[in-house]
Image (tube, rainbow, N blue to C red):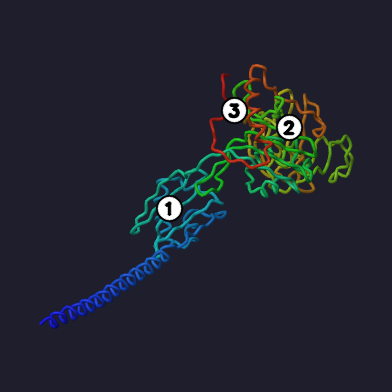
Amino acid sequence: MNRRLLVIPGVALALLAAIGVLAWHRQHKIEEEVIREADQAHTEEVKQEAQAEIPPLETRIGPGDNFPSALQKSGISAEDAAAISNVAQRAFNMRQIRAGNTIVVMRNPYGGLREIDYKIDADRMLQISAGNHNFTADVKPIPSKTEIANIAGTIDDSLFNAVAQSGESSELTLQLAQIFGYDLDFYTDPRRGDTFRVVLEKKKYADGKTAGYGKILAAEYNNGGKKYQALLFHDETGRSGYYTADGKALQKSFLRSPLKFGAPVTSHFSKARFHPILKRYRPHMGTDYGAPVGTPVQTIGSGRVVFAGRKGGEGNMVQIAHTNGYETMYLHLSRMYVRPGEHVEIGKTIGLVGSTGLSTGPHLDFRIMQRGQYQNFEKLGLPPSDPVSKKYWPEFALVREHWLPLLQNPTPITARVVPPIVSTGSR
């Protein structure tokens, strides 16, 4: 009796052990199946994500393109391109589409249109959404932030290339040339080894790319060891302008060149020059700048247009009257952009270089008179504007103390813009 009782518990234990092993194998298979299904799901998800990641197609609008033709170059049918343009016209004047701007086309995983973005300018985007062949369009702001940054570079051959090598755009080159254009001709004056430094407002998109530039707060150009510095400040009327560190105005009555970046002088002011067409000696009352047809010509000073038209051997000519009895003339133009009686600001593009009239080739014949007498522009002393007045000197001193150390800082800085201290205070 006791032996049978002892055997039964032993069999029971064996059965329990067998049941446990079977249960473990079953659980293990279930876990393996769950893992396998999870792996398959993940693989399918990755495939779907890969399928969804159709890269956006960016197309630059070419000269002569309109919006529909640019869309067709992006692979959109002529029918859809026409429909999209009609919808977009309700949100934005499509006549203002500019060559060089970009169109970005985004598609869904099946190749259908999802969104079209046209960058209007640095701050605005025309966004067109597509769904079931229905399109909606809206102009939306492009998120950006403004920072203060410093930029530096060394001249090897030109200011254009030096700015480009520093990673910046030609917009900055034009601003620098305008600031220092009263003292420097950026065709003849720059030398290899010259340096520039700038502290300015820089707008950046969320991806870190530069959206554009704001105000240049301080700048320096070292030309063969001679430093030219500029600080942004206001004048007596409250208008912003640039001044040297000792408070002298950089802006003078006239620019140093009728071309934004100058050009080689091919013929100087002379009382007796041999005329290449007339084949005789006669006075040459101007300065000739050799430049290709179509080069923009700027007025060297603000004034009123007294003549704009064809005038015999001078060809197409623009004549402008300035203050203090000065008059300037721009000869042999291919195009003229001003009319008699029109007021023009200093630096305005008034026409394009040409070869009209008595001319052997494309060039600009520039002349300047003072009280009816022709002057040699290459040797003419340019009258300066007023310096910082004593009344505003304490405020100017604060501006100078704030920006000059940042201008001299060799380490690049990037900081969020704080309320500017230029153009502030009681006036």
Question: The residue under label 2 is which amino acid type?
Answer: Thr
Q: Quadrant of residue 246?
A: top right
C-alpha distance separating marks 3 and 2: 34 Å
Depth check: give the residue in front, 147 or 263: 147
Question: The residue under label 3 is which amino acid type?
Answer: Val
Depth check: give the residue in front, 208 or 90: 208
Helix or strand or loop: what does disc 1 sit on? Answer: helix
The answer to whether 130 is drawn above or below residue 47 in the figure is above
Marks 1 and 3: which is nearer the front? 3
Residue 426 placed where, x, y %?
A: 56, 19
The residue at the point 59 percent across, 23 percent down is 238
Residue 247 placed where, x, y %?
A: 70, 24
Residue 90 placed where, x, y %?
A: 40, 46
Residue beneath label 3, please?
422
The answer to whether 403 is drawn above or below residue 95 in the figure is above
Q: Quadrant of residue 350?
A: top right
Residue 341 in sight from this viewpoint? no
The residue at the point 54 percent across, 38 percent down is 416
Q: Are marks 2 and 1 in contact (CB under 8 Å)?
A: no
Residue beneath label 1, please?
85
The answer to whether 333 is drawn above or below residue 1 in the figure is above
Residue beneath label 2, please?
328
**Which of pointers 3 and 2 lies earlier in the amino acid sequence?**
2
